[in-house]
Image (cartoon, grey):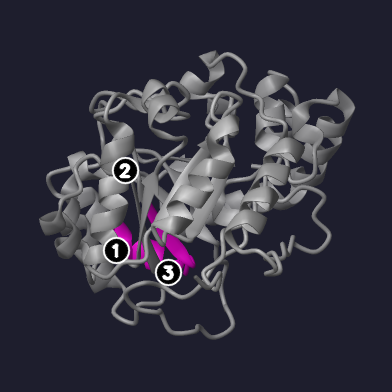
Amino acid sequence: MSPGNCVSWLTGARSEVTSSSTALPVSQPPSRQAPTAPAVSNVFLHVTNACNLRCAYCYASADQLGRDELTTAEILRLWPDIVTIRPRKVVFTGGEPLLRPDILTLLEGLRDADPGHKIRRCFNTNGWLITEHIARQLVGLVDEIRVSIDALAERNDALRGAGSFEAAVFALDVCRLVGFEPRALVTITPTSLSDLQELICFLVDKKITRISFNVVRAIGRGARYEGCVVDLREARATVREAWEQCFPGQPRPRQTPRSGRQVECGLGDFVNIMANGDVYPCHVLTHTRFFVGNVREESCSAITRRIRNFGESVASAFASSAQSHRSNHTQPNGCPGSTVVKTAAALSEEASSTM
């Protein structure tokens, strides 16, 4: 089997900033001209806080339908505004997006607002509700389906819920059946690290070669997850060993970190919209002091300008703070936001002054 769709190389940041693999499974958005206005890399839209699983380390603490979640009409009105900030991707996430009965309507709204298909549409799911019928309905509305699977069956189900491994594998299989090239989203924990090499080889054997890695964040239920810090060096070594086992003699994919960035991070490039419309600069910095606006009250363009200014002025301070605290997050490509969470009020005044 060719490694052309290579396993995304491990970084400590969100999967969105790992090395990308190949073209989209359904349709490739055309290349865009040079930007003429502020743009962002990714918009994450948490369409609901409701979830049918209770993963031990969920950063969103997803469980029940949240209070005052954005309505169908509010999200549909949001799409033209999001198109104007020209993100590379819009990621539907949650909670579990398929728990929204209007999810197809929301996807159709983004498709119609972006007739040139300049925005890549990604869909995160735990896989539990995926059927062949639903997968076929998503064809043409979604460019990439991402399914969470964190370990082999026993450990995965202990961490994510009984039956979740089988559901995730079925979802990956059925998405391939209908024409997608699905991506596996793997959150690495100290508990699951021992399964990682075998899990990667299992997925590659099933022709799932788009794999992105993440580590537990100390927010949401993750803040209560004991032993959540993973040794990133050990994790990367495990991924390398899996690559060599799956693709002997083949060169590994190369990481291309952003020039001049000490920490590879989406800060300043991500727009993180919560289910109630509140916006934060990333998944980790969701404390009230990092609140940058609400899409019900102002445009995405105005909010995005603040996010970009925030990212540029605080990124170096995050790296400095990480080094001074000598935590696991000081490792290359570690998450600077996690350092802030770990050190409570660190940088809060500095960050607030840049808003």
- Image: 193 above or below 292: above
Badge 1 density bin: few <14, some 14–19, many ≥20, Cα 10 Å: some
Q: Earlier in the sequence, mark 2 or mark 3?
A: 3
Q: Quadrant of the C terminus?
A: top right
- Residue 148: quarter of image: top left
Magenta part of the chain:
77-91
Q: Is residue 169 left or right of residue 216?
A: left
User: Which element type, helix, strand or loop, lies under badge 3?
Assistant: helix
Identify residue for label 3: 84
Q: Which residue is mark 2?
A: 168
| Residue 75 seen in this snapshot | yes
- The question of residue 86 being in magenta is answered with yes
As shown in the figure, which amino acid type bears the numbered disc 2? Answer: Ala
Mark 2–mark 3 Cα distance, whole angstroms, equals: 35 Å
**Secondary structure at numbered mark 1:** helix
Q: Which residue is mark 1?
A: 176
Mark 1 or mark 2: whose residue is earlier in sequence = 2
Residue found 41% across the figure and 77% down from its top: 118
Of the residues shown, which amino acid type is indicated by label 1? Arg
- Judge from the rendering whether residue 337 lies leftward or rightward of residue 127; answer left or right: right
